[in-house]
Amino acid sequence: MTDTAPTQLLLVDDEASLREPLAEYLTRQGFVVREAESAASARSVLMEFTPNLILLDIMMPGEDGLSLCRHLVETRELPVILLTAKGEATDRIIGLEIGADDYVVKPFEPRELVARIRSVLRRTGKTGSKPAPEEDAIYVFEEWQLDPLKRRLTDPDGVVISISTAEFRLLQAFLENPRRVLDRDRLLDMVQGREAHLYDRAVDNQVSRLRRKIEADSRNPELILTVRGGGYRFAADVRRQPAAQS
């Protein structure tokens, strides 16, 4: 990595035979890696350590990875890559729906995992690099504001609205493409990444949740419109302005 500071990872997996050699490999690739053997251990580590990204096994004794992922998405806004077994298709779908950024199926090639890590870090802006001026600008639409660096959504009255990582990515995709029809495949590629076409239901679910956040009446939306046979269209003008003016 060429970032100004080493990328820090938290690897959460109860299988020491996988976790320990993987941590060593990632360390050789230039990452700073902390390990946790359970969700409880991960929660303890996170009290004193804030990683750039979390690698999270789904199937663990005690609290499982999906429960911890939901907690991280809702409270920490940290990028998460799920480590899943081949037979956990339903869990992968749930993981993507609650806001995981990607998943890798075990057994996996470590080089593929590194590529996934770097892709998610670029997509989520968690690399540690100084943002370009345009990346530092906020989105403004219908008196709403979205700060992409702080991932903060503010309504016209100045109230901060809680928004999940998945909802943030979806809204940002719309704001970067105002008044354009975005089909489900395009949206999934923009907000979920790998093999997202398998989970088109995830887009509809996230659109419904996002509408409840930003529409005056989510049953009669005026901002995120459904295009029959085509997908969705964001029906408002969007501008960018320096964050200092927010």
Image (tube, rainbow, N blue to C red):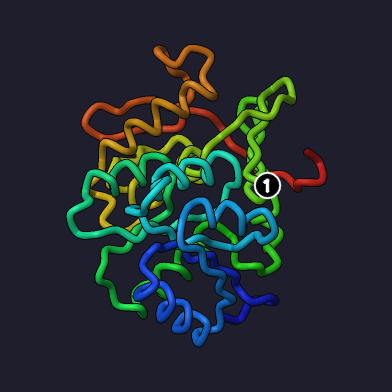
Instruction: Tell me the residue at 65%/39% (across/down).
Output: 152
Q: Residue furthest left?
A: 87
Amino acid bearing label 1 = Lys
> What residue is shown with label 1?
150
Count how many numbered circles sit on residues in the image: 1
**Residue at the spot x=66%, y=67% of the render?**
128
Residue 46: x and y in percent read 62, 55
- Asked if residue 173 can be seen in this view, the reply is no
Q: Name the quadrant containing residue 229.
A: top left
The C terminus lies in which quarter of the figure? top right
> Where the N terminus falls, by quadrant?
bottom right
Q: Is 48 located above or below residue 128 in the figure?
A: above
Towards the viewer: 208 or 108: 108
For residue 103, say whether it is visible.
Answer: yes
Query: Residue placed at 40% from the left, 47% from the top?
Result: 62
Q: How crowded is mark 1: few (under 14 residues within 10 Å), some or many (20 or more)?
A: few
Furthest toward the right, the residue is 244
| Location of residue 32 in the rendering, given as x and y in whole percent from the top left corner | 59, 76
Image spot of residue 63 (x, y percent): 42, 45
Please tell me whether residue 107 is drawn above or below residue 80 in the rendered image.
below
Classify mark 1: helix, strand or loop: loop
Report whether 220 appears left or right of 87: right
Q: Which of 73 and 2 is in front in this view?
A: 73
**Nearer to me, 211 or 121:** 121
- Rendered residue at 65%/59% (across/down): 50
Spot occupied by residue 72 in the image (x, y as percentages of width and height): 53, 46
Q: In this view, does 79 lie to the left or right of 231?
A: right
In the depicted structure, whether residue 96 falls above or below residue 22? above
